[in-house]
Amino acid sequence: MSLISQNADKVKKGKKSDFDDINVEVEPRKETNSDKTRSRKRKKGNKDGDFDIEQEKQMKKLENVLFGSLYSPVEFGNEDEEEVDDPMEKTSALFFTDRSANSNMSVYEDDAEILERSDDVEQGDNLRKAVWVDDEEEMVSVNIAKVNRLRKLRKEEDESLISGSAYVARLRAQHAKMNPGTEWAQIDFRPRSYSSDDDESGEENGAVVVAPGFEDVEAVSDILRTNEDLVVKGGSKLLPGLLEFSRLVDANAEEPSNGPINSVQFHRNAQLLLAAGLDRKLRFFQIDGKRNTKIQSIFLEDCPIRKASFLPDGSQVIAAGRRKFFYSFDLVKAKVDKIGPLTGRDEKSLEVFETSPDSNTIAFVGNEGYILLVSTKTKALIGTLKMNGTARSLAFTEDGQQLLSSGGDGHIYHWDLRTRTCFHKAIDEGCFNGSALCTSPSGKLLAAGSASGIVNIYNRDEFLGGKRKPMKSVENLTTKVDFMKFNNDSQILAICSTMKKNSLKLIHVPSLTVFSNWPPAKTTLHYPRCLDFSPGGGFMAVGNAAGKVQRCIGNVV
């Protein structure tokens, strides 16, 4: 309405005016843009005011939750529920006691009662005290009959008000009832044994049933308290016939050798691989199965490497060639030392040697049947042993106290390193020129290879007792046996010859048979020169004359 029309209404209510007889027609004024803007601002102001009020309520509500009842007493469970005028009358007919939660509820209710008596009674050792207790819980009363979703917490039909601590205990019991399956995490939990009659009763009582063979509670607890491997691959039995394996990326794919690989060996941690050859380099690779990153390479300028080996303790690498000296590389200090010539000796080659399992002694093959014993600590000559014929191969026993040797006379010698005397000597059946020796990690087996390609496998105790007949004579190689190696659990014996392509065989020791699918038909091993098994027995690395280190993995090796 305009201003003129408002004045006209007031005149009619009072005395009759001179203008009563005049008919004034006023056209309604059109709403301008400014009026619309003011109207929108008023509406927006109203909305902003409502929003501020609502936000203030929310802030007060959050402050009440965080810091207690600052503005109004705390009421539990009435935020989203409608109030019922007389809840006791409307729910009496629907009330029932849930007996399935009695066992769970009693646990937390007992805790609440014990907490109430904690000031007067000394608590037991098995009770775990709460780190922090809210003192206001006892001062708060909660009406569990007022809200529909809290009525399930009642124990009696006419129960309504309970204390805050009792309210918390019942909520915990309700949670335990609705979320079963965490009993194994309790300190005093003991699973019960399995029986055919426990199928239904176990479901009803919520108890954990232990399957047959797993009744040992302590064994189950030990598994959960350790980070050791649950599956021990070394205990698996390898079946004869076919060997299951898969080819992996070459160990030295990142940097192949420029010459033949003469030595390849895994470090005892199974993650470091050593490769050495005639290109005068010691290469170390990190074995991960994908990239096999090269960590370091050491160049020995005046020594083409014929053999390199870790000490069993993993602290040093010994490298030697057809020289009067040898090299020692300290892995911890990253220091290379040149040792030799040995005092009192004129050997021109120290290329054949073995390290003792106790990492105390290095045995070198010398001239005219001599075996040179060198200390790993001082790198000095500590003794010599003398064979009747030429010495060509060596092998230590598992304890490092005895040494085996063979050579040009076809005999196998057993030496006691403590007295440095030969306590047993016997001929290797059918051998005229011994070329390789190997003992099993367990010390029970002995393998002897000859220049004719025959490998004899002996029971070492029987061989020392006078029995000269081997357990098995393997005739799969037709050229000189240059290298032999047992795997970690003595189930596989690998034999190879450097004079023929793919001349590498794997023998199943328990059955004394050769795996028929090795070497693989579609894989070329070139001229194999050395090999090694990983400490866990899962990998095998083969070095060849092409400068490559080929790796394979077997699911049971």
Image (cartoon, rainbow, N blue to C red):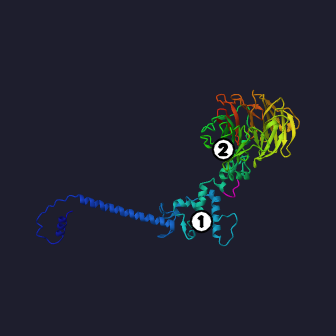
Q: CA distance from mark 2 to mark 1?
A: 62 Å
Mark count: 2
Compared across the picture, whether 472 is left or right of 182 comes to right
Amino acid type at circle 1 is: Ala
- In the rendered image, which residue does mark 1 sit on? 166
Of residues 510 and 488, the one nearer the viewer is 488
Is 255 placed above or below 20 here? above
Queried whether the magenta region covers residue 358, the answer comes back as: no
Q: Quadrant of the N terminus?
A: bottom left
Quadrant of the rendered structure where residue 8 is? bottom left
Q: Main secondary structure of the magenta part?
A: loop
Q: SS for tag 2?
A: strand
Tell me the residue at 59%/57% (across/down).
175
Give how far across and how far down residue 254 sits, in percent. Answer: 59, 39
Question: Measured along the vertical axis of the image, is residue 145 above or below residue 519?
Answer: below
Label 1 sits on a secondary structure element that is helix
Q: Tell me which segment is drawn in magenta.
A: 186-191
Residue in the image at 34% along x and 63% along y:
46
Question: Which of the pair 474/349 is nearer the observer?
Answer: 349
* Res 443 seen here: no
Place residue 285 in its image quadrant. top right
- Name the residue beneath numbered marker 2: 272
Q: Nearer the viewer, residue 476 or 377?
A: 377
Q: Badge 1: how crowded within 10 Å, few (<14), some, or many (20+)? A: many
Mark 2 or mark 1, which is nearer to you?
Answer: 2
56 with respect to 151 (left or right): left
Q: Earlier in the sequence, mark 2 or mark 1?
A: 1
